[in-house]
Image (cartoon, rainbow, N blue to C red):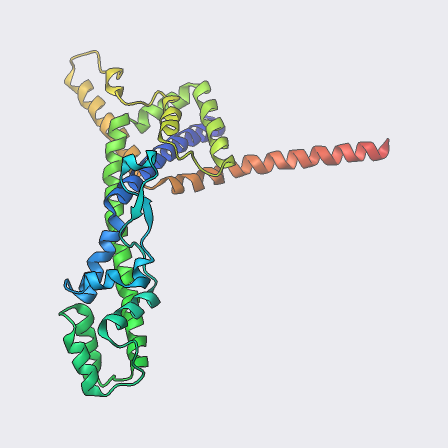
Protein backbone atom coordinates (compact mmCIF):
# COMPACT_ATOMS: atom_id res chain seq x y z
CA UNK A 1 0.00 0.00 0.00
CA UNK A 2 1.47 3.32 -1.10
CA UNK A 3 1.51 6.10 1.50
CA UNK A 4 1.20 8.71 -1.26
CA UNK A 5 -1.93 6.95 -2.55
CA UNK A 6 -3.48 7.01 0.92
CA UNK A 7 -2.63 10.70 1.22
CA UNK A 8 -4.21 11.47 -2.17
CA UNK A 9 -7.42 9.68 -1.13
CA UNK A 10 -7.42 11.59 2.17
CA UNK A 11 -6.99 14.89 0.31
CA UNK A 12 -9.89 13.97 -1.97
CA UNK A 13 -12.16 13.25 1.01
CA UNK A 14 -11.12 16.47 2.74
CA UNK A 15 -11.84 18.52 -0.39
CA UNK A 16 -15.36 17.05 -0.59
CA UNK A 17 -15.95 17.66 3.13
CA UNK A 18 -14.72 21.21 2.65
CA UNK A 19 -17.04 21.87 -0.31
CA UNK A 20 -20.05 20.40 1.50
CA UNK A 21 -19.12 22.37 4.61
CA UNK A 22 -19.04 25.54 2.50
CA UNK A 23 -22.54 24.74 1.20
CA UNK A 24 -23.77 24.28 4.79
CA UNK A 25 -22.09 27.53 5.90
CA UNK A 26 -23.60 29.48 3.02
CA UNK A 27 -27.13 28.15 3.59
CA UNK A 28 -26.80 28.69 7.37
CA UNK A 29 -25.76 32.30 6.80
CA UNK A 30 -28.76 32.90 4.53
CA UNK A 31 -31.19 31.38 7.02
CA UNK A 32 -29.70 33.18 10.03
CA UNK A 33 -29.93 36.51 8.22
CA UNK A 34 -33.47 35.87 6.98
CA UNK A 35 -34.80 34.85 10.42
CA UNK A 36 -32.48 37.29 12.28
CA UNK A 37 -31.44 34.47 14.60
CA UNK A 38 -28.59 36.35 16.28
CA UNK A 39 -30.78 39.40 16.91
CA UNK A 40 -33.58 37.29 18.38
CA UNK A 41 -31.18 35.55 20.76
CA UNK A 42 -29.84 38.92 21.92
CA UNK A 43 -33.31 40.42 22.38
CA UNK A 44 -34.34 37.46 24.52
CA UNK A 45 -31.67 38.49 27.05
CA UNK A 46 -32.34 42.23 26.70
CA UNK A 47 -35.96 41.59 27.69
CA UNK A 48 -34.67 39.83 30.82
CA UNK A 49 -32.59 42.90 31.66
CA UNK A 50 -35.16 45.67 31.11
CA UNK A 51 -38.52 43.86 31.04
CA UNK A 52 -41.18 43.59 28.32
CA UNK A 53 -42.51 47.10 28.94
CA UNK A 54 -39.16 48.83 28.51
CA UNK A 55 -37.67 46.86 25.60
CA UNK A 56 -39.26 49.25 23.09
CA UNK A 57 -37.80 52.25 24.92
CA UNK A 58 -34.37 50.60 24.91
CA UNK A 59 -34.53 49.93 21.17
CA UNK A 60 -35.53 53.54 20.46
CA UNK A 61 -32.48 55.08 22.16
CA UNK A 62 -30.16 56.70 19.57
CA UNK A 63 -27.06 54.76 20.65
CA UNK A 64 -28.99 51.48 20.21
CA UNK A 65 -30.68 52.47 16.95
CA UNK A 66 -27.28 53.17 15.38
CA UNK A 67 -26.26 49.52 15.92
CA UNK A 68 -28.99 48.05 13.72
CA UNK A 69 -27.38 46.33 10.68
CA UNK A 70 -28.62 47.30 7.20
CA UNK A 71 -29.53 44.35 4.98
CA UNK A 72 -31.83 43.45 2.12
CA UNK A 73 -35.48 43.70 3.09
CA UNK A 74 -36.23 40.21 1.73
CA UNK A 75 -34.58 37.68 -0.65
CA UNK A 76 -36.10 39.40 -3.71
CA UNK A 77 -34.82 42.84 -2.64
CA UNK A 78 -31.41 42.01 -4.10
CA UNK A 79 -32.82 42.89 -7.53
CA UNK A 80 -33.90 46.37 -6.45
CA UNK A 81 -31.29 47.00 -3.75
CA UNK A 82 -34.08 47.59 -1.21
CA UNK A 83 -32.59 47.58 2.28
CA UNK A 84 -33.83 48.19 5.81
CA UNK A 85 -32.46 48.16 9.38
CA UNK A 86 -32.66 44.73 10.99
CA UNK A 87 -32.64 43.57 14.60
CA UNK A 88 -29.60 44.49 16.67
CA UNK A 89 -27.09 41.64 16.73
CA UNK A 90 -24.26 43.04 18.84
CA UNK A 91 -24.08 45.72 21.53
CA UNK A 92 -20.81 46.89 23.15
CA UNK A 93 -21.19 46.45 26.90
CA UNK A 94 -20.37 50.13 27.58
CA UNK A 95 -23.15 51.20 25.20
CA UNK A 96 -25.65 48.87 26.88
CA UNK A 97 -24.71 50.17 30.34
CA UNK A 98 -25.14 53.78 29.19
CA UNK A 99 -28.52 52.90 27.65
CA UNK A 100 -29.68 51.20 30.85
CA UNK A 101 -28.63 54.18 32.96
CA UNK A 102 -30.56 56.41 30.54
CA UNK A 103 -33.70 54.30 31.03
CA UNK A 104 -33.31 54.35 34.78
CA UNK A 105 -32.78 58.13 34.87
CA UNK A 106 -29.30 57.81 36.37
CA UNK A 107 -27.21 59.29 33.55
CA UNK A 108 -27.45 62.96 34.55
CA UNK A 109 -26.74 62.23 38.20
CA UNK A 110 -23.29 62.30 39.79
CA UNK A 111 -24.25 61.55 43.37
CA UNK A 112 -27.59 60.47 44.82
CA UNK A 113 -29.07 59.91 48.23
CA UNK A 114 -30.05 56.36 49.10
CA UNK A 115 -33.80 57.10 49.14
CA UNK A 116 -33.68 58.91 45.80
CA UNK A 117 -31.75 56.04 44.21
CA UNK A 118 -34.16 53.46 45.65
CA UNK A 119 -37.15 55.42 44.27
CA UNK A 120 -35.69 55.54 40.76
CA UNK A 121 -34.92 51.83 40.76
CA UNK A 122 -38.36 51.04 42.14
CA UNK A 123 -39.94 52.74 39.12
CA UNK A 124 -38.29 50.28 36.76
CA UNK A 125 -40.50 47.41 35.55
CA UNK A 126 -39.83 43.97 37.01
CA UNK A 127 -36.72 42.54 35.34
CA UNK A 128 -33.44 40.82 36.08
CA UNK A 129 -31.69 44.20 35.86
CA UNK A 130 -33.95 45.72 38.50
CA UNK A 131 -33.41 42.75 40.81
CA UNK A 132 -29.64 43.14 40.47
CA UNK A 133 -29.83 46.86 41.37
CA UNK A 134 -32.00 46.12 44.42
CA UNK A 135 -29.52 43.51 45.66
CA UNK A 136 -26.59 45.92 45.28
CA UNK A 137 -28.45 48.77 47.01
CA UNK A 138 -29.41 46.46 49.89
CA UNK A 139 -25.73 45.59 50.18
CA UNK A 140 -25.02 49.28 50.76
CA UNK A 141 -23.81 50.21 47.26
CA UNK A 142 -25.06 53.75 46.62
CA UNK A 143 -22.18 55.22 44.62
CA UNK A 144 -23.18 55.57 40.96
CA UNK A 145 -19.57 54.87 39.95
CA UNK A 146 -19.63 51.57 41.84
CA UNK A 147 -23.08 50.74 40.42
CA UNK A 148 -21.79 51.39 36.90
CA UNK A 149 -18.78 49.12 37.51
CA UNK A 150 -20.99 46.30 38.80
CA UNK A 151 -23.50 46.80 35.98
CA UNK A 152 -20.71 46.58 33.40
CA UNK A 153 -19.50 43.26 34.84
CA UNK A 154 -23.07 41.94 35.06
CA UNK A 155 -24.01 42.99 31.52
CA UNK A 156 -20.78 41.50 30.14
CA UNK A 157 -21.87 38.12 31.47
CA UNK A 158 -25.39 38.55 30.08
CA UNK A 159 -24.09 39.45 26.61
CA UNK A 160 -21.80 36.42 26.68
CA UNK A 161 -24.78 34.24 27.58
CA UNK A 162 -26.69 35.67 24.61
CA UNK A 163 -23.75 34.87 22.30
CA UNK A 164 -23.48 31.35 23.73
CA UNK A 165 -27.21 30.79 23.20
CA UNK A 166 -26.93 31.84 19.56
CA UNK A 167 -23.84 29.65 19.02
CA UNK A 168 -25.58 26.63 20.58
CA UNK A 169 -28.64 27.09 18.38
CA UNK A 170 -26.51 27.66 15.30
CA UNK A 171 -24.47 24.54 16.09
CA UNK A 172 -27.63 22.42 16.38
CA UNK A 173 -28.86 23.82 13.08
CA UNK A 174 -25.52 23.11 11.36
CA UNK A 175 -25.65 19.47 12.49
CA UNK A 176 -29.22 19.04 11.21
CA UNK A 177 -28.39 20.81 7.94
CA UNK A 178 -25.22 18.72 7.51
CA UNK A 179 -27.29 15.53 7.76
CA UNK A 180 -29.86 16.90 5.30
CA UNK A 181 -27.22 18.04 2.76
CA UNK A 182 -25.37 14.74 3.04
CA UNK A 183 -28.55 12.76 2.34
CA UNK A 184 -29.61 15.15 -0.43
CA UNK A 185 -26.32 14.69 -2.29
CA UNK A 186 -25.87 11.06 -1.16
CA UNK A 187 -22.24 11.66 -0.22
CA UNK A 188 -21.14 8.26 1.07
CA UNK A 189 -17.61 8.47 2.47
CA UNK A 190 -16.97 4.74 2.01
CA UNK A 191 -18.05 4.74 -1.66
CA UNK A 192 -16.19 8.00 -2.30
CA UNK A 193 -13.00 6.58 -0.79
CA UNK A 194 -13.31 3.51 -3.05
CA UNK A 195 -13.78 5.71 -6.12
CA UNK A 196 -10.76 7.83 -5.23
CA UNK A 197 -8.66 4.73 -4.56
CA UNK A 198 -9.37 3.15 -7.94
CA UNK A 199 -9.58 6.28 -10.10
CA UNK A 200 -6.33 8.17 -10.68
CA UNK A 201 -8.11 10.84 -12.72
CA UNK A 202 -10.47 11.56 -9.82
CA UNK A 203 -7.49 11.88 -7.46
CA UNK A 204 -5.87 14.33 -9.88
CA UNK A 205 -9.06 16.43 -9.91
CA UNK A 206 -9.08 16.42 -6.09
CA UNK A 207 -5.44 17.49 -5.95
CA UNK A 208 -6.07 20.32 -8.41
CA UNK A 209 -9.10 21.50 -6.41
CA UNK A 210 -7.12 21.32 -3.16
CA UNK A 211 -4.36 23.50 -4.61
CA UNK A 212 -6.93 25.95 -6.00
CA UNK A 213 -8.73 26.24 -2.64
CA UNK A 214 -5.48 26.88 -0.75
CA UNK A 215 -4.26 29.33 -3.40
CA UNK A 216 -7.40 31.48 -3.29
CA UNK A 217 -7.69 31.08 0.50
CA UNK A 218 -11.16 29.62 0.52
CA UNK A 219 -14.00 28.48 -1.67
CA UNK A 220 -16.21 30.55 -3.90
CA UNK A 221 -19.26 31.94 -2.08
CA UNK A 222 -21.41 31.07 -5.10
CA UNK A 223 -23.65 28.07 -4.44
CA UNK A 224 -23.76 27.02 -8.10
CA UNK A 225 -19.93 26.91 -8.23
CA UNK A 226 -19.84 24.69 -5.14
CA UNK A 227 -22.40 22.31 -6.67
CA UNK A 228 -20.34 22.21 -9.90
CA UNK A 229 -17.28 21.28 -7.85
CA UNK A 230 -19.22 18.39 -6.29
CA UNK A 231 -20.42 17.15 -9.69
CA UNK A 232 -16.81 16.38 -10.63
CA UNK A 233 -17.01 13.54 -8.10
CA UNK A 234 -20.39 12.40 -9.47
CA UNK A 235 -21.96 13.86 -6.32
CA UNK A 236 -25.32 15.35 -7.25
CA UNK A 237 -28.95 15.63 -6.24
CA UNK A 238 -30.89 12.59 -7.44
CA UNK A 239 -28.01 10.19 -6.66
CA UNK A 240 -30.51 7.45 -5.79
CA UNK A 241 -31.43 7.16 -9.48
CA UNK A 242 -27.92 5.96 -10.39
CA UNK A 243 -27.14 4.08 -7.15
CA UNK A 244 -26.04 0.49 -7.72
CA UNK A 245 -28.07 -1.80 -5.47
CA UNK A 246 -27.32 -5.47 -4.66
CA UNK A 247 -28.35 -7.65 -7.59
CA UNK A 248 -29.27 -10.66 -5.47
CA UNK A 249 -32.26 -11.02 -3.17
CA UNK A 250 -30.03 -12.31 -0.39
CA UNK A 251 -31.02 -10.69 2.91
CA UNK A 252 -27.41 -10.66 4.11
CA UNK A 253 -26.24 -8.72 1.05
CA UNK A 254 -28.97 -6.14 1.52
CA UNK A 255 -28.28 -5.81 5.25
CA UNK A 256 -24.58 -5.25 4.53
CA UNK A 257 -25.39 -2.72 1.80
CA UNK A 258 -27.73 -0.75 4.09
CA UNK A 259 -25.24 -0.86 6.97
CA UNK A 260 -22.33 0.40 4.84
CA UNK A 261 -24.50 3.06 3.19
CA UNK A 262 -25.74 4.35 6.56
CA UNK A 263 -22.19 4.27 7.95
CA UNK A 264 -20.80 6.12 4.93
CA UNK A 265 -23.48 8.80 5.07
CA UNK A 266 -23.08 9.10 8.85
CA UNK A 267 -19.31 9.62 8.61
CA UNK A 268 -19.84 12.28 5.95
CA UNK A 269 -22.48 14.13 8.00
CA UNK A 270 -20.25 14.09 11.09
CA UNK A 271 -17.30 15.38 9.05
CA UNK A 272 -19.27 18.13 7.29
CA UNK A 273 -20.70 19.36 10.60
CA UNK A 274 -17.16 20.25 11.70
CA UNK A 275 -17.36 23.25 9.39
CA UNK A 276 -15.54 24.30 6.24
CA UNK A 277 -12.89 26.27 8.19
CA UNK A 278 -11.79 23.08 9.99
CA UNK A 279 -11.24 21.23 6.71
CA UNK A 280 -9.63 24.26 5.08
CA UNK A 281 -7.03 24.47 7.87
CA UNK A 282 -6.32 20.75 7.51
CA UNK A 283 -6.11 21.04 3.73
CA UNK A 284 -3.68 23.91 4.06
CA UNK A 285 -1.45 21.88 6.39
CA UNK A 286 -1.46 18.91 4.03
CA UNK A 287 -0.66 21.16 1.08
CA UNK A 288 2.14 23.00 2.90
CA UNK A 289 4.71 20.17 2.71
CA UNK A 290 4.36 19.95 -1.06
CA UNK A 291 4.55 23.72 -1.33
CA UNK A 292 7.65 23.79 0.84
CA UNK A 293 9.23 21.00 -1.22
CA UNK A 294 8.52 22.86 -4.44
CA UNK A 295 9.99 26.04 -2.97
CA UNK A 296 13.10 24.17 -1.87
CA UNK A 297 13.50 22.66 -5.32
CA UNK A 298 13.05 26.06 -6.93
CA UNK A 299 15.60 27.71 -4.65
CA UNK A 300 17.93 24.76 -5.21
CA UNK A 301 17.63 25.17 -8.96
CA UNK A 302 18.17 28.89 -8.58
CA UNK A 303 21.33 28.31 -6.55
CA UNK A 304 22.62 25.84 -9.10
CA UNK A 305 21.97 28.28 -11.93
CA UNK A 306 23.74 31.05 -10.03
CA UNK A 307 26.72 28.80 -9.36
CA UNK A 308 26.88 27.79 -13.01
CA UNK A 309 26.72 31.41 -14.11
CA UNK A 310 29.49 32.35 -11.68
CA UNK A 311 31.73 29.53 -12.86
CA UNK A 312 31.07 30.54 -16.46
Residue at image location 39% in from the left, 28% down from the top: 225
Q: Position of residue 36 (x, y in %)?
A: 25, 47
Q: Is residue 271 visible?
A: no
In this picture, residue 152 sits left or right of residue 201: left
State the residue lying farthest toward the right: 312
Q: Nearer the viewer, residue 35 or 210?
A: 35
Q: Is residue 171 above or below residue 293?
A: below
- Which residue corresponds to the image point at 36% horizontal and 22% vertical from the top-left? 231
Image height check: is 10 above or below 168? Answer: above
In depth, the one of 307 and 247 nearer the eye is 307
Total label count? 0
Residue 237 lies, in percent from the top left, at 28, 23
In the rendered image, residue 118, in percent from the top left (x then y), is placed at 18, 82
Q: Nearer the viewer, residue 61 or 219?
A: 61
The quadrant of the rendering that contains the N terminus is top left
Tell me what residue is drawn at x 30 percent, y 27 percent.
Answer: 187
> For this view, does 240 lie left or right of residue 91?
left
Place residue 188 in its image quadrant.
top left
Where the C terminus falls, by quadrant? top right
Q: Position of residue 176 (x, y in %)?
A: 23, 39
Q: Residue at x 84, y 35 (%)?
A: 310
72 or 299: nearer the viewer: 72
Residue 284 in view here: yes
Determine the image quadrant of residue 206.
top left
Amino acid sequence: MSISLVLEVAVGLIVVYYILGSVVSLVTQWINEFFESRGRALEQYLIKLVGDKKIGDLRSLPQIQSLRPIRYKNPLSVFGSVTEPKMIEKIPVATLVDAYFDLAGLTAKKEMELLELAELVDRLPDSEGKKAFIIWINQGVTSLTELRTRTTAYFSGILEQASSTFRARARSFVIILSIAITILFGTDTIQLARNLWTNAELRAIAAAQANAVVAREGASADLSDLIDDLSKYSIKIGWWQTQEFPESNNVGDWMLFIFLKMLGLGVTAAAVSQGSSFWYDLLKKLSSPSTSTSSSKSSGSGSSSTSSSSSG
